[in-house]
Image: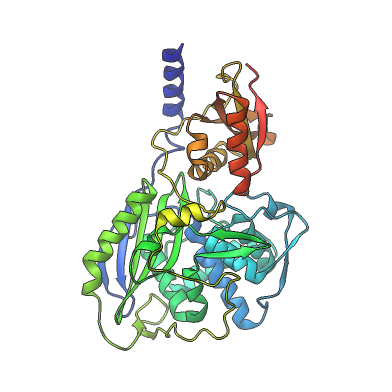
Amino acid sequence: MKTIRRLLLAMCALALGSATAFAGSASLVLDARTGKVLSSENADTLNHPASLTKMMTLYLTFEALRRGDISWDSKIKVSKAAAAKPPMKLGLKPGSTITVREAVYAMIVRSANDAAAAMSEKLGGSESNFARKMTAKARQLGMRRTVFINASGLPASKQVTTARDMSTLAVALMRDYPREYRLFSTPSFTFRGRKIRGHNNLMYRYDGMDGIKTGYTNASGFNLVSAVRDGNRRVIGVVMGGRTARSRDDKMAALLNRHVGKASNGRQLVAAAKTRSTTAVELASTATMSDVPLPYTAPHRAKGDNVAALITASSAAIVPAERPTAMVEVETTAAVPAAGRWQIQISAAPSAEAARALLAQAQMVGGDMLAEASPYTEAVGKGAGTIYRARFVGFSSRDAAASACDTLKKRSYDCMLLPSRG
């Protein structure tokens, strides 16, 4: 029986190969003072940005704050569509409100998709309209190959960018909104009594790093944009398409170690970003922060901090795990879990790709609790009305399934305990 099951799963994996294909590896290291490229690998190859998308959502948020269209205390109403976004999320309820300040910290620290969607609706009227504004801003900044479809980075086949374009956006954030940019180094914040920690692990162990953003979907692989200050040197690093969070972080650290010393050591902070002008532009100092609201839990970087301590310090910690190398799901009821076992359902999605991405994200935070389970998608309905249930199956006992469900609920996932139908 086990042999037959393995063969069936292998056949499903082959059938789904195109949907779960790994992204291409790409990287770029940029001198933020001069715009000189210090290292480049496939820098203009299209990849999916994943949650690096939120860098542009935040850029437009900072722009709206600067114009006075919104304030840090402005209320954002959470729509049903925004609340329904899959994790990572804050778990916002339809009809509730969140402040701009809370949304900004949620996007930076939690990489919250519901907060990003709510902000996009606030600023653009709808997420699709806001995405058009994001793409237009990308062109204005010189990001020639980037297209945005949503505000969060959730899977969308036409949402693409390059390592070069993401370095351009990082420089734009540093240059245009230097005070707000400092928020990208925030390790945690408190949201309505709950402490939420970030998962940019490399920031906690690499000296001089001040952010800025991680990203992951099954289609994109593990992405990271980092900024490092070394004396008067300022360097931006981009790594895309990593197979695991650890390998991505290790690659970034190795690139920075190799190339930071090559960056300009001049005192004037300038960056030849790819704007419409070809002249160098002033990169303002990040020292002045008087008009940026501090998080409810102020940033701190104690020398004794390490990744393990950050993980165990809070149940809300989000720690990227290794990317699945053989993610296997069954899209129909043809392979029903064995009788007597338990399963959990975390959501339903409009496509199999979205359901797989949701399961992959959940695997990252479920840890040992999901070790004995298998990801499983089930198509329900017909035609345009088809939805795909995202489940984990194969738990040996009700207690094991319940424990996994409780773990996911603490990380803002919906979770329903179900007995096998076998």
- Would residue 23 be visible to someone looking at this image? yes
Q: Could you tell me residue 244's position as x and y percent?
A: 37, 46
Query: Quick check: 21 left or right of 131?
Result: left
Q: Answer above or below: position of 317 versus 364.
A: below
Residue 145 appears left or right of 89: left
Image color mode? rainbow
Nearest to the observer: residue 310 or residue 388: 310
| Front residue of this view, candidates 154 and 180 | 180
Q: Position of residue 205 (x, y in %)?
A: 36, 62
Residue in front for this viewpoint, 78 or 69 = 78
Q: Residue 155 placed where, x, y %?
A: 53, 48
Q: Which residue is outermost to the right? A: 95
Q: Residue 207 appears in which quarter of the rendering?
A: bottom left
Q: Is residue 11 above or below residue 300?
A: above
What residue is shown at x 42% (from left), y 70% (from top)? 170
Q: Is residue 128 left or right of residue 142?
A: right
Q: Nearer the viewer, residue 209 or 204?
A: 204
Quarter the C terminus occupies: top right
Q: Is residue 135 visible?
A: no
Q: Residue at x 43, y 28 (%)?
A: 13
> Who's the residue at 54% across and 72% down the image?
298
Q: Is residue 102 above or below residue 174?
A: above
**Residue with the most extreme top position:** 1
